[in-house]
Image (tube, rainbow, N blue to C red):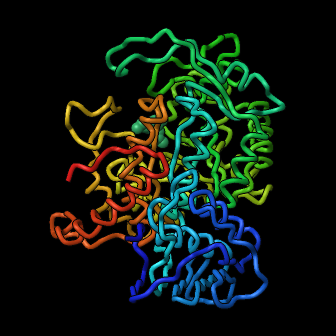
Amino acid sequence: MLLPRPTHLIREAGHFALDAATSVCAPVGVADLLRELLTPATGLPLPPVGAPGEGVISLLVRDDPELGAEGYRLRVDPAGVRAVAAAEAGLRWAVQTLRQLLPEQVYAAGPVTGVPWRLPMVEIVDVPAYPWRGSLLDVARWCHPLPLLYRYVDVLAMHKLNTLHLHLTDDQGWRFEVRRYPRLTEVGGFRVASPAGHLRDGRSDGVPHGGWYRQAELRDLVAYAARRGVRIMPEIDLPGHAQAAIAAYPEFGNDPTRQLAVGTTWGISTHVLNLEPATLAAVHHILDEVVEVFPFEYVHVGGDEVPTAEWAANPAAVARATELGLPRVADLQGWWTGRLAEHLAGHGRRTAVWDELLDRGAPAGATVFAWRGIDRIDAARAAGLPVVAAPYSHTYFDWAESDDPAEPLAIAGVLPLRTVYGFQPGDVLGVQGQLWSEYLPTEQRVWWRAFPRLAALAEVGWSGPVPTDDTGAVPPGVWAEFRSRLTGQLRRLDRAGVSYRPPDD
Ligand code: TNX
């Protein structure tokens, strides 16, 4: 019934029935969350009460070394509910578990009558396998509206996923308002056209697209997510995938006399930032505003797919490489990213980067997002760096789920649900599923590609990888057990009004 599967669960005979008299004893934020999640459908007021007792839902912070930062214990019996956790984060997950223990109608946005709001009698101890359980959403390729981002946060929290990685900038759009550089969004937020069909077809839709988020809007989203235990990691992708920024400020590029347009095709732009002190200072200013809006400890500065031809042709860049004693012009990327990491460290922040930095001198202590295959996970670990496992082979949900020609258009590749569920991340900080949005222009497409695969990855991240057979396949019994719980989870999504791709088997 529960997804992700809890570490220990004992089901006993009996129930606790919620009614108008049921009250809640919990830290204010946790009690508010419980009401926010249960009251709309149940209509129950769930008022606060000062002490635990008969008929009370108690959610309490108690020292408990076994539970770590996010674990919780939960007991439901006919007299009430008692959950404990070492921190409020664990209590928030306990709230999500309580919601899953109720009939699925609790996920409806409005009142549902005629449902017995009963919790089964259970004893649960639940501690996540990995501290980083993330989902990347690319809002640069298509500027998805804020209501989708709010729903996305809700659904991450339902799956005990604790991190939303917001990919805010790319060649085709800059979505983060920067007060000091308004053209980043005014110019960089809009493009004149997008590819029609697949990039390889070479057609353009001729339709302008654009948009961006105000800092105040993002702050509200961050606060909403925080109430649900979801942290938002911003990504400002630099110094490549930055054509939108160079279109806005040609002086950031390698030829300040050239006016580029915001990208209108997908792929890898050859245009990258220059490495001049003035541009570095501008990037520092941009990051200063990023950290004001996003309190999360990590800031992702990208670093994927950075072509170096423009640096090689730029005498200033070549001279800098020589002056720094760098053997290759490409190594300038490591040096430059190191300057960003230092700047972020000055703000008390940690730097996250894509795994390309491993080949170009990753900054000391940077957290590596390994995407170009499983071997990149090992490479990051060998370099002594913390790593989030995000390999395309198991976590690229922009890939189609099957090779059925009827699948909606996808970038490349096939990633079946079973492959995701069989993922063995190894000894890493955690896992993350990627929704690059080149081919996800609408909310419906986003959900189609996100679920059910994100549910499978959430379970890998929280419950730990499942045993696989010699061929790396998930054994039939293990699969069947997951599938039956997944069916229940998909009913919850139905009630929440979230669509998904029906599983094949
Ligand atoms: C590679 S993954 C990219 C993205 C694309 C993605 C499409 C990564 C760090 N860079 O720019 O959207 O492939 O699958």
Q: Position of residue 235 (x, y in %)?
A: 62, 44
Q: Is residue 364 visible?
A: no
Q: Residue at x 39, y 60 (%)?
A: 489
Q: Position of residue 434 (x, y in %)?
A: 45, 46
Of 230 and 58, which appears nearest the observer?
A: 58
Q: Position of residue 444 (x, y in %)?
A: 44, 35
Q: Is residue 487 above or below residue 70?
A: above
Q: Residue at x 77, y 39 (%)?
A: 215
Q: Is residue 68 above or below residue 185?
A: below
Quarter residue 398 falls in: top left
Which quadrant of the figure contains the N terminus?
bottom left
Q: Residue furthest front?
A: 114
Q: In what quadrant does ligand 1 lie?
A: top left
Of 277 and 202, which appears nearest the observer?
A: 202
Q: Residue at x 34, y 53 (%)?
A: 394
Q: Is residue 430 above or below residue 501?
A: below
Which quadrant of the figure contains the C terminus?
bottom left
Q: Position of residue 472 (x, y in %)?
A: 21, 64
Q: Is residue 142 above or below residue 49?
A: above
Of 208 and 301, which appears nearest the observer?
A: 208
Quarter residue 462 falls in: bottom left
Q: Is residue 105 left or right of residue 283?
A: left
Q: How many marks?
A: 0
Q: Is residue 369 left or right of residue 456?
A: right
Q: Is residue 427 visible?
A: yes
